[in-house]
Amino acid sequence: MSASIEMKQPVIVLVRPQLGENIGKAARAMLNFGLTEMRLVSPRDGWPNPSAGPAAAGADDVLENAEVFETLAEAVHDCANVYATTVRKRGVTKPVVTPEEAAREVYATAQNTGARSAYVFGPERSGLETDDVALARAILTVPINPEFASLNLAQAVILCAYEWSKGANLAQPTVEDLLPPAPQDELEGMISQFEKVLEPTRYFYPESRAAATRRTLRNMLTKPGWNSLEVRTMRGVLSALGGNRRPKNTEA
């Protein structure tokens, strides 16, 4: 990860987390989306916690580099933007933002001033206390079922981390592996072959509808965005259906 991206990273602050497993799962959620800096405020069972490692599923660096603080104020001392994640109003008037809006502010703050930002998450059972929310600059929340407004810690972390990651240009292997679209002449060859295979079946009958039918067929075949391998495969299928089968290998 480049230095510029590291500079823009928000800090993930877990306030009085209760279970080591949940700290590990939060670390896993962070690293999935490129976040590496975790800060813990008075973890209930102390730190390090042996239960965190297995739950982190390989995000060991996040846990090993986690910093522990006595108070939330100390944990966010260097952060210009502090977002309190909560779905409940606690009598504190603050701007309310979504994870997407917060991510934009995190990047803008880092680029314009170089200052850090922090996402703050409360204990698993009760969430952030009123004093915790009061310390923040804004409340971060998401639309959620009012009759079941219950996210676990890792879920809450991953919502914020994912929105931040959109601006981090993280690798997307499934996208990188896609082949480019086939050139138009390859598509034309496939369409022509379709028509030749269909002609003997009277598919384009009656003649008065032939042009419209060919046009519909062309529209269908040009929608998927075939790549060259897919075009060759489909033409092989058409050749087989049309009776032009490949000769079987014969032993000498």
Image (cartoon, rainbow, N blue to C red):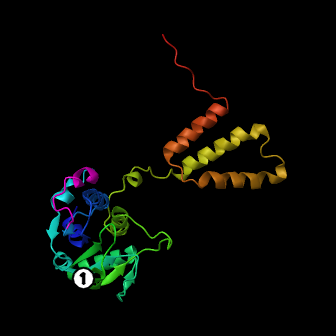
- Classify the position of the N terminus by image quarter: bottom left
> Residue 94 at what x, y percent from top left?
35, 87
Q: Where's residue 32, x and y in %?
A: 31, 58
Task: Give the quadrant of residue 150.
Answer: bottom left
In the rendered image, which quarter is residue 85 located in? Answer: bottom left
Q: Hey, which residue is sitting farthest top in the picture?
A: 252
Residue at the bottom extreme, as displayed: 93
Which of the two residues, 152 or 218, is positioned nearer the viewer here? 152
Residue at horizontal 65%, vertical 45%? Answer: 192
Q: Is residue 177 magenta?
A: no
Place of residue 174 in the rendered image (x, y in percent of width and height, measured from the top left): 40, 52
State the image quarter where residue 137 is shown.
bottom left
Number of numbered callouts drawn = 1
User: Which stretch did the figure color magenta?
Assistant: 43-56
- The prevailing secondary structure element of the residues shown in magenta is loop
Q: Is residue 48 magenta?
A: yes
Q: Nearer the viewer, residue 160 or 75?
A: 75
Badge 1, how many Cα within 10 Å: few under 14, some, many 20+?
A: few
Considering only vertical position in the picture, is 245 above or below 21?
above
Report whether 191 appears left or right of 80: right
| Residue at 28% across, 85% down | 134
x and y percent of residue 245 in the render? 61, 27
- 128 vs 249: above or below: below
Residue at which label 1 appears: 112
Name the amino acid, label 1: Asn
Q: Which residue occupies 49% across, 12% down?
A: 251
Q: Secondary structure at mark 1?
A: helix
